[in-house]
Image: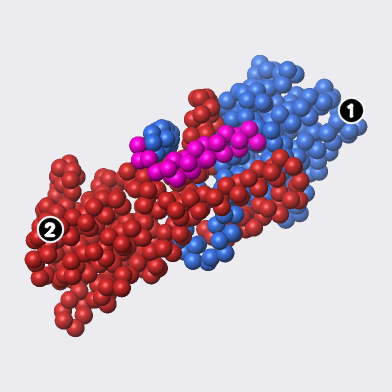
Chain colours: A blue, B red
Amino acid sequence: MDEDGFGLSTAQVAIVGLGLMGASLAMDLRGHCAGIVGVSRSPETLDYAIEHRIVDRITDFDSALDCDLLVLAAPVRTIIKQLQKICDLPSAIRSKRPTVVVDLGSTKTKIVHAMQALPSRFDPIGGHPMCGKEIAGIRYAEPGLYRDKTFVLTLLERTSPRALALVREMIGVIGGVPLVLSPERQDALVATTSHLPYVIASALMRTALSKGDDQLWTAAASGFRDTSRLAASDLTIMIDILLTNREAILDALKDYRAELDALTTLVESGGEEALRAALSPAQQQRARLFK
Amino acid sequence: MDEDGFGLSTAQVAIVGLGLMGASLAMDLRGHCAGIVGVSRSPETLDYAIEHRIVDRITDFDSALDCDLLVLAAPVRTIIKQLQKICDLPSAIRSKRPTVVVDLGSTKTKIVHAMQALPSRFDPIGGHPMCGKEIAGIRYAEPGLYRDKTFVLTLLERTSPRALALVREMIGVIGGVPLVLSPERQDALVATTSHLPYVIASALMRTALSKGDDQLWTAAASGFRDTSRLAASDLTIMIDILLTNREAILDALKDYRAELDALTTLVESGGEEALRAALSPAQQQRARLFK
């Protein structure tokens, strides 16, 4: 809380999108803010959210804008549409209440660009919590999803210290680790660490499917399970990511293909020492990275 | 046990190679056979095996051949060398004792080929338990490693029903699920389900390393962790696999590269419906496969 008494504990929070991310956030924020309202287009999700006390009450998008902290927790292209909609809503512009806006979208350049056009009473900051599951939906929401996970923040020129402090307080409450990056840098990093692995996993699944051999699934052990896991990710979320971070993902794919071709040539030419020299740095770094 | 009183409970078992696989097998066989001797080239491994009562006693390779069930649990090319060595050992040929030989190597065509040349008192059968970890060594051995995991058996023309029955009894004791396949078919299947994922994971690690950006590891969350996991695999084991299953792996890599290129083109051209159509079968199959 700052010297004006503004802080998370007195904030009315609105979460738009009550899927895995939004609902898990609501669970962790309970008791740490003045109230949580939820918005979803799905009646089943709203019923579930009320029944399981994930939010205090439900409302519609327009009414949700009348809050202190607005969290946009939908797929990326939906977030962009919602930001554009706010610009067109007379009620959103008329209100004098200051509202901090943060989103949970996986790509940031296009979202931050849309945030720039928000009416002046909105105080936007981009967010990307680096956690999730390959399954989507409120039923998979759980407390602690954000704990010890990197939470990227992308600041706009117009982002106020007040907005940054409030969102940092929110990240503190849910146990995340804030990391400030420019939108372009964040998008380039996650293209390699997250979006490329998704394409890789999907290509692996498609390769396995193309064999048309059911015995193959019997032979699929833990190595296949882990390498292919991301292919099960929610398609709406992933297609939004692919379409809003296309250039960075294509760059990562180009580099990856070069590495794949180099390893293929080494498997083909069969030099043991050359194989060891190529695989060893990857082996050592991966062994260091996750203990 | 068969009608002659031959079975696992009366069998002297020798395990050559006390790494993760061999030592975990020894742990699970304890109490189910007449005795377990262990062979390793590493004095530290032998000390550890005795100290932790993983084997009853240690011996050398030549003496280990005087057993009822010989388990070769080294990397693939070492197994092939050991099979060739048996052919050259006068003592191995002189003894009249029948010895069932099974191995735990990940590729089977070249091992089964080497098994064909064994002296007649040896009764060989190829084995490939589809389990493991990305870490190697006796310190990571654990009971239950084989439980509920597919254990591929590759039969030779000379494999006797007696050998098959004994090895099936062993697999039953450790809780594995036996699956008889030809060596060529097993090698083609695991090229796609295991060896291709290893090359994929290594290429991903090399791509990430090539960025030379330490911030990238901060951005590496659970998706990157799982997709890259196999890159941490033991190099000696993996290089033996790459070199002894080269043709099948190159076939799998060729198919994978075509799938990767197709997905890259779709990311590039940006059609949402085309992306969904390409990714959806992979998404559905992966979601079905591992619940």
Quadrant of res B175: bottom left
Report the mark closest to the observer, 2 or 1.
Answer: 2
**Does A25 appear above or below A118?**
below
Q: Are marks 2 and 1 on the same chain?
A: no
Quadrant of res A24: top right
Q: Amino acid at mark 2?
A: Leu
Residue B89: numbered disc: 2
**Does B257 appear above or below A14?**
below
Res A68 seen here: no
Q: Where's residue A176, x and y in %?
A: 55, 32
Q: Look at the image and tell me in which quarter the C terminus of chain A lies.
A: top left
In the shown orientation, is residue B235 left or right of residue B204? Answer: left
Residue at 10% across / 70% down in the picture? Answer: B96
Q: Where's residue A9, x and y in %?
A: 64, 29
Residue A94: numbered disc: 1
Res B284 seen here: yes
Region of the chain picked out in magenta, as a range: A250-273
Residue at 77% across / 49% down in the picture? Answer: A41
Q: Look at the image and tell me in which quarter the N terminus of chain A lies.
A: top right
Q: Chain of mark 1?
A: A
Q: Magenta region's main secondary structure?
A: helix
**Mark 2 surroundings within 10 Å by alpha-carbon count, few (fewer than 14), some (14 through 19), many (20 or more):** few
The reply to whether the magenta stretch includes residue A189 is no
Q: Where's residue B273, x and y in %?
A: 76, 51
In the shown orientation, is residue B104 left or right of residue A72? Answer: left
Marks 2 and 1 sit apart, C-alpha to C-alpha, by: 93 Å
Closer to the camera, B146 or B275? B275
In the shown orientation, is residue B77 left or right of residue A245? Answer: left
Q: Chain of mark 2?
A: B
